[in-house]
């Protein structure tokens, strides 16, 4: 057999965009300039939870350079949810707040002006009449009776196919706990993380002579943003031309559809190019974070290290709105038991709303907090039963042919090989029995 | 307030601009003159992505009033880039994969230029110290440090030894 000719594998190939980057010739959104551009700044909620009783623009309108304000009444389909394009519902987030705000920094009204300074000054002069409401900032508090309710459907959780959480049921955990030599429990909490891209989120919208709008944007989700914007603005998709791909740092922080719909609307209403770029403090305080997660593990473990039952109850803090969290919770539920072969698993993963800045996508979102919790839990198991932390993972490692708790057959396991390689790299001696293991050593799978 | 006229040298060209008082060098370069290699990251002197050289010293253009550069020499990344080809620092950044999203790259190159101009053979610690005011949120610091080391070798004629 002739060796295949490899053009890329094993070669060092220069980045296509590298020369642009080192010469400063790469054009980012904020580098694009058009004459007569207007600038959009946002009036935001100063409090985490309130009813909006009134908005007074009279002082803002007096600022030299003020062009116009936009409120929810200007947005054709004001209530949306980003993942509606993949069937997630119901719609629950306003583009601009209507009668209520649910997190500090929520968008209430847009100010369009001739300069960024004028827009900012005018936005600061908008008088908000707010009636503050009790707020909830903790996922478990949010699920207790009497908690302030954020959603029109009367609860603070996303509904998964009629259930209050994403459930995974596999085997019988109670039976597993009865048989186990040890019961080992752990509570794990992660904090929100801001992506903090060096280039802040933003877009520039230009009305074209042919009736279309060209949207220069640094979104990570170009067509997702186009489709959502068209649905929000009640426009045929072909009226929007999105131009992007050059992103000055994203990491998941630029997949939500936040700046484009309102900037396109402002361009439609004014007939001018409109720029809406987050300031650094907006990027930090308002843009989606990696949400916070709380996870409770209860494991039944045999004296030889085998985990025979694992029960996980977890709570994702979505903040005030869905963004990508309902999807993150489903991914989380599929991964939170870990790359281990456990015969009895019970998972309840909740997507919970609080009055916090919305959480959303970030690098493996949903799975990364699970990996943190479950691997600390594995160490805790090893320590409790007096076993080597490497051994506990080899003993339980999944292999090809195993069935994961959500009924997915494992087809591409490399955990054993990865651990073997890692042990060698760090100079950790492994017993022969672990060195001899491989991911294909289950004859026909172990679940029949 | 009445506009002011300020004269300075930009990338070797004598330049005269009319500005509102307290306009930043960042805004002048990007909005008035179209030099967009100088980036906008934080507008508060925290990220280093807008760094320019003023008489050879790296400064945050977002905190620098245009009045302060009167009569001085300002150098941006556009001014470092040769008409044809690349500056050795640019070559080293390009060939050593010292860019990811590219947004911090102009600022990184400017502070590296200032470093090598005053210290042609910096130690690794001196390079890290020089870069310490510049944020690379892709966290690609190691290839950037290596690129500066590599550029120093090239500029001292040690390339290929």
Image (cartoon, rainbow, N blue to C red):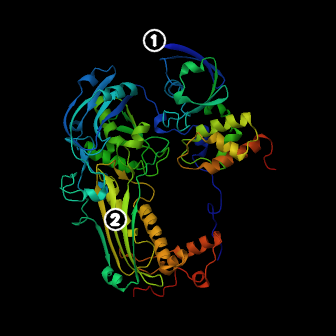
Residue A146: percent from the left, percent from the top?
A: 18, 55
Q: In which quarter of the image is residue A131?
A: top left
Can residue A399 be seen?
no
> Which residue in the structure is indicated by mark 2?
A314
Could you tell me which residue is drawn at 30 percent across and 42 percent down?
A: A106
When the figure is inspected, residue B72 is found, relative to residue A143, above or below; the finding is above
Can residue A240 be seen?
yes
> Foreground mark, 2 or 1?
2
Q: Which of A237 and B25 is in front in this view?
A: B25
User: Is the same chain shared between marks 2 and 1?
Assistant: no
Left or right, A72 with reference to A112:
left
Q: Which of A332 and A205 is in front in this view?
A: A332
Could you tell me which residue is drawn at 62 percent across and 33 percent down?
A: B77
Q: Which of B135 and A327 is in front in this view?
A: B135
Could you tell me which residue is drawn at 57 percent across and 75 percent down?
A: A417
Q: How crowded is mark 2: few (under 14 residues within 10 Å), some or many (20 or more)?
A: many
Q: Are marks 2 and 1 in contact (CB under 8 Å)?
A: no
Residue B86: percent from the left, percent from the top?
A: 68, 39
Q: Residues within 10 Å of mark 1 (few under 14, many from 20)?
A: few
When the figure is inspected, residue B3 is found, relative to residue A126, above or below; the finding is above
Residue A429: percent from the left, percent from the top?
A: 64, 77
Total labels drawn? 2
Q: Which of A197 and A386 is in front in this view?
A: A386
> Which residue in the structure is indicated by mark 1?
B2
Quarter of the image with the C terminus of chain A in it:
bottom left
Left or right, B149 with reference to B41:
right
Gap between marks 2 and 1, in whole Å? Answer: 61 Å
Q: Is mark 2 on a helix, strand or loop?
A: strand
Q: Is mark 1 on a helix, strand or loop?
A: loop
Residue A47: percent from the left, percent from the top?
A: 28, 40
When the figure is inspected, residue A166 is found, relative to residue A435, above or below; the finding is above
């Amino acid at each position: 057999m002739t060796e295949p000719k490899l053009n890329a594998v094993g070669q060092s190939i220069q980045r296509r965009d590298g020369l642009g980057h080192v010469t400063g010739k790469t054009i980012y959104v904020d580098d694009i300039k058009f004459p007569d551009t207007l600038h959009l700044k946002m009036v935001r909620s100063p409090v985490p939870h309130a009813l909006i009783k009134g908005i007074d623009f009279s002082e803002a309108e007096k600022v030299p350079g003020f062009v116009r304000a936009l409120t929810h009444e200007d947005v054709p389909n004001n209530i949306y949810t980003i993942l509606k394009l993949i069937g997630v519902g119901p719609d629950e987030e306003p583009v601009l707040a209507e009668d209520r705000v649910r997190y500090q920094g929520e968008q209430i009204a847009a100010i369009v002006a001739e300069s960024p300074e004028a827009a900012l000054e005018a936005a600061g002069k908008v008088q908000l009449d707010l009636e503050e409401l009790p707020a909830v900032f903790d996922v478990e508090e949010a699920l207790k009776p009497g908690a302030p309710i954020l959603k029109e459907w009367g609860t603070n959780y996303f509904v998964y196919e009629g259930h209050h959480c994403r459930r995974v049921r596999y085997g019988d955990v109670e039976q597993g706990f009865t048989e186990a030599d040890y019961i080992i429990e752990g509570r794990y909490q992660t904090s929100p993380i801001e992506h903090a891209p060096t280039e802040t989120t933003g877009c520039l919208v230009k009305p074209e002579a042919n009736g279309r709008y060209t949207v220069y944007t640094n979104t990570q989700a170009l067509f997702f943003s186009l489709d959502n914007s068209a649905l929000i603005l009640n426009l045929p998709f072909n009226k929007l031309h999105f131009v992007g791909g050059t992103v000055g740092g994203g990491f998941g922080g630029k997949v939500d559809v936040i700046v484009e719909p309102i900037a396109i609307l402002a361009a439609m209403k004014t007939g001018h190019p409109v720029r809406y770029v987050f300031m650094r403090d907006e990027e930090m305080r308002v843009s989606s974070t990696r949400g916070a997660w709380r996870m409770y593990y209860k494991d039944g473990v045999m004296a030889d290290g085998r985990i025979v039952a694992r029960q996980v109850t977890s709570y994702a803090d979505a903040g005030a709105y869905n963004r990508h969290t309902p999807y993150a919770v489903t991914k989380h539920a599929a991964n939170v038991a870990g790359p281990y072969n456990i015969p009895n698993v019970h998972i309840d993963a909740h997507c919970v709303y609080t009055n916090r800045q919305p959480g959303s996508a970030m690098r493996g979102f949903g799975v990364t907090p699970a990996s943190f919790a479950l691997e600390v839990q594995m160490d805790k198991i090893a320590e409790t039963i007096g076993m080597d932390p490497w051994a506990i993972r080899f003993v339980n490692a999944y292999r090809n042919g195993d069935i994961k708790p959500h009924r997915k057959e494992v087809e591409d396991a490399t955990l054993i090989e990865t651990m073997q390689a890692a042990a060698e790299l760090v100079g950790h001696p492994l017993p022969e029995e672990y060195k001899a293991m491989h991911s294909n050593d289950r004859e026909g799978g172990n679940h029949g | 307030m009445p506009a002011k006229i300020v004269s300075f040298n930009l990338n070797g060209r004598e330049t005269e601009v009319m500005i509102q008082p307290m306009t930043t060098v960042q805004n002048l370069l990007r909005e008035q003159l179209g030099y967009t290699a100088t980036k906008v990251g934080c507008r508060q002197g925290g990220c280093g992505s807008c760094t320019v050289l003023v008489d050879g010293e790296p400064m945050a253009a977002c905190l620098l009033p245009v009045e302060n550069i009167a009569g001085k020499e300002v150098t941006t990344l556009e001014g470092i880039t040769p008409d044809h080809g690349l500056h050795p620092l640019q070559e080293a950044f390009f060939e050593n994969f010292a860019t990811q999203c590219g947004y911090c790259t102009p600022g990184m190159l400017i502070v590296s230029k200032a470093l090598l101009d005053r210290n042609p053979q910096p130690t690794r610690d001196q390079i890290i110290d020089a870069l310490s005011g510049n944020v690379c949120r892709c966290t690609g610091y190691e290839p950037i440090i290596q690129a500066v080391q590599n550029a120093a070798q090239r500029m001292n004629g040690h390339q290929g030894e």
